[in-house]
Amino acid sequence: MRLMTKPLRRTALFIFALAFASPASAAAPPSTPHDGQHDFDFDLGIWKTHTSRLDRPLTGSTTWSEMDGYTVVRKLWDGRANLAELESDGPKGHLSLISLRLYDPRARQWRLYFATADVGVLSVPMVGEFKDGRGEFTDQERVGDRTIWVRFTFTSISPDSARSEQAFSDDGGKTWETNWVNQYTRVAALPEAAAASARRAHAAQAGSRDFDFNVGVWKNRIKRFVDPLAGSAATIELAGTVTVNRVWDGLAQIEEIEADGPNGHWEGLTLFLFDPKARQWSQLFANSKKGTMEPPLIGSFKGGRGELVSQDTVGGRSILVRSVWSDITDNAHHYEESYSDDLGRTWKPAFVVTLTRDTP
């Protein structure tokens, strides 16, 4: 669970134009910005997926590889977020990929994050929106020794089919080379399939099962410190539920948090990813009012105690953030998030959470 919050952070020509505007134009009502929080509703459900991937993009290659599999998209935050899980096979092996999509209600844009089970690290977000039935999302990434633009689009959307494409540009967006195409066909159910051998191998690694205790439905009691860095003892109490589901047979988890307190209802989610190379976990939190992921807390478990740390900014100051999972039993565990503004010499609690299994 990651619960961190942060404090909330005309021209002469315009006036001239207003002065000489016609009565009709001056009286015209402003257009209402598009509220895109349900733009991904078309994608919810189960899709048979055919994938074509270009070998060695940006090298002049014209060789493509084909894969077939299924994509399952589940709704989060009543549609203001969702998680897509792709499992696909081809001549070059198996692919386990997730895409977490978050809606930012302030910007009215979506952020798309990606990760694969073989890497276990979340990508930088692709940011964009839907217009006239087309979704377009971009980011800037390092590929090889070059920084390029990456574009991801959704097109040809109907109730039972859709298409997505990824393209690269190494000339600032003047030209684009498509390197990944997905064709989706809706199906009623997901066929039974064995877990991929690559995932089974990762699941046998030390540390890959450390968050298994977290799966299920929990009651939470949250004590939030109002001003942790000031050392204030003032707190706000919240209570609610936490629902945690496995992804990739437990090599990742998605955690949905709901709680109520004196300031009303609050929602968040946490994505947990196991990095098979580093044999560490990352814990990434998002608040439904912001629609962005916080920097990942990274760490591992020792002696039944999990400790993960990140660097972040709170109130304009760079600090360390630490999450500690402890007192773990079958039906209860304890979570504490603390801040440090002296490079970890001392820690000040920001959130203290008690979780108990929600049983009938």
Image (spheres, rainbow, N blue to C red):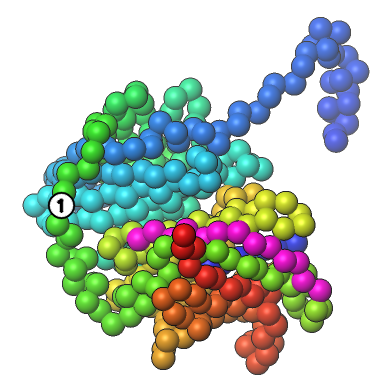
**x, y percent for residue 193:** 15, 52
Give the crowd class for mark 1: few <14, some 14-19, many >=20 residues within 10 Å.
few
Question: Which residue occupies the foreground of this view, 318 or 264?
Answer: 264
Say which residue appears at 31% left-offset and 44% top-offset.
72
Say which residue appears at 14% left-offset and 65% top-offset.
197
Q: Label 1: state its secondary structure.
A: loop
**x, y percent for residue 40:** 45, 36
**x, y percent for residue 239:** 64, 62
- Quadrant of the image occupied by residue 181: top left
Q: Main secondary structure of the magenta part?
A: strand
Question: Which residue occupies the foreground of this view, 166 or 309?
Answer: 309
* 97 over 346 or under it: above or below: above
- Kind of residue sitting beneath label 1: Ala
Say which residue appears at 63% left-offset and 57% top-offset.
259
In the displayed orientation, state which residue is furthest to the front: 360
The residue range painted magenta reads: 234-246
Q: Is residue 106 left or right of residue 169?
A: right
- Quadrant of the image occupied by residue 268: bottom right
Q: Is residue 277 left or right of residue 331?
A: left
Question: Which residue occupies the foreground of this view, 180 or 245?
Answer: 245
Residue 237 part of the magenta-drawn span: yes
| Residue occupied by mark 1 | 193
